[in-house]
């Protein structure tokens, strides 16, 4: 541990040395650029020293540098070492080229590292979006049916005599594809004016679309059946559906309020009429009026 007295003496010596160094008139024009830089470097380094060990280490390093400089100077005057120095001089450009190549590789790796970091951030953002979508699947979208087996796997009879799937009979009758109302996208919902939406949510509107599609499907299932296969009730419905058709609805899929009451659990009220306004605004439906009846045609 350094005592107080040596420290006081060291600081006094340092101040005296710095004062002498500052009083010396140094003329750069009288020395070479190397000597000027060496002097300025020594003066700047010395002013930063705070302990005697730092001063000693700094002076030893300077002495070693001077010795190496003198050795190199003497080597330049030695004819036997001139060839070695020339070879070293010839190899310096190739070493410089290698250093430049390494520098270029380092810069390229840094650029690739930045690209990989950007890719990592992009993948992380996409993963967060996918996770959010997975946790917020709209209720109207179909979900994967859960496999609930009522049979006991420990039952020997079940294990011995598994039920063989019955092969489906290929129907020769053409399948009728019933058109459906496309669900709203979130972007479309956001562009609906606020006075139309009121307090209705995105999921509520698409849930109504799901019910309306079920009504249209049930209606045209009856219309696509042969008359001979219809019951008395469904035949009356068939006749009503045909009477509702007009020239404007020919070849189009449509429904009326009676279909909503017969095939869905929806209530025909002001809220439903507000949803119809939104669907017309989003080009999902159009109205065809006539004979005291409003027909909602699918677009």
Image (cartoon, helix red, strand yellow):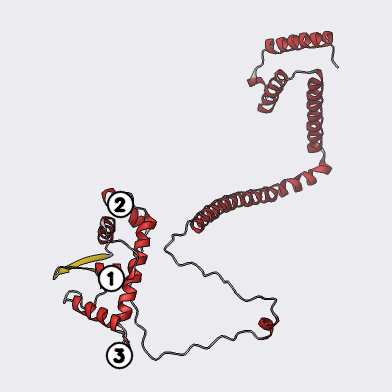
Q: Return the residue at label 1.
A: 259
Q: In terms of sequence position, does the residue under pointer 3 or pointer 1 come before the other?
A: 3
Residue 33: image location, x then y, percent:
65, 27
| SS type, badge 1 | helix
Q: How many marks?
A: 3
CA–CA distance in space, label 3 to label 1:
22 Å
Q: In terms of sequence position, does the residue under pointer 2 or pointer 1 come before the other?
A: 2
Q: Return the residue at label 3.
A: 228
Q: Quadrant of residue 159?
A: bottom right
Looking at the image, can residue 106 be seen?
yes
Which numbered mark, 3 or 2, is in the foreground of this view? 3
Disc 3 packing (10 Å; few <14; some 14–19; many ≥20): few
Residue 37: image location, x then y, percent:
67, 26
Disc 1 packing (10 Å; few <14; some 14–19; many ≥20): some
Looking at the image, can residue 182 be seen?
no
For residue 282, above or below residue 168: above
């Amino acid at each position: 541990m350094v005592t107080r007295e040596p420290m006081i003496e060291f600081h006094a010596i340092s101040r005296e040395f710095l004062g002498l160094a500052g009083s010396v008139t140094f003329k750069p024009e009288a020395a070479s650029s190397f000597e000027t830089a060496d002097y300025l470097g020594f003066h700047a380094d010395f002013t930063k020293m705070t302990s005697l060990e730092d001063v000693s280490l700094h002076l030893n390093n300077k002495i070693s540098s001077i010795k190496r400089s003198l050795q190199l100077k003497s080597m330049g005057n030695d004819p036997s070492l001139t060839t070695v120095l020339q070879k070293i001089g010839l190899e310096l450009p190739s070493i410089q080229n290698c250093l430049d190549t390494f520098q270029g590789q380092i810069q390229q790796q840094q650029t690739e590292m930045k690209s990989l970091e950007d890719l990592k951030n992009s993948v992380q953002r996409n993963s967060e979006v996918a996770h959010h979508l997975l946790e917020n699947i709209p209720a109207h979208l179909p979900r994967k049916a859960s496999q609930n087996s009522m049979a006991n796997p420990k039952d020997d009879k079940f294990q011995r005599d598994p039920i063989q799937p019955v092969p489906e009979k290929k129907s020769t009758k053409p399948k009728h594809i019933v058109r459906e109302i496309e669900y709203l996208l979130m972007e479309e919902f956001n562009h609906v004016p606020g006075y139309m939406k009121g307090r209705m949510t995105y999921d509520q509107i698409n849930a109504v679309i799901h019910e309306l599609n079920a009504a249209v499907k049930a209606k045209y299932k009856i219309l696509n059946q042969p008359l001979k296969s219809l019951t008395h009730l469904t035949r009356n419905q068939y006749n009503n559906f045909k009477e509702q058709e007009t020239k404007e609805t020919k070849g189009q899929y449509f429904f009326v309020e009676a279909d909503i009451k017969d095939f869905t659990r929806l209530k025909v009220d002001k809220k439903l009429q507000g949803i119809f306004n939104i669907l017309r605004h989003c080009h999902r439906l159009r109205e065809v009026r006539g004979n005291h009846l409003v027909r909602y045609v699918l677009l």
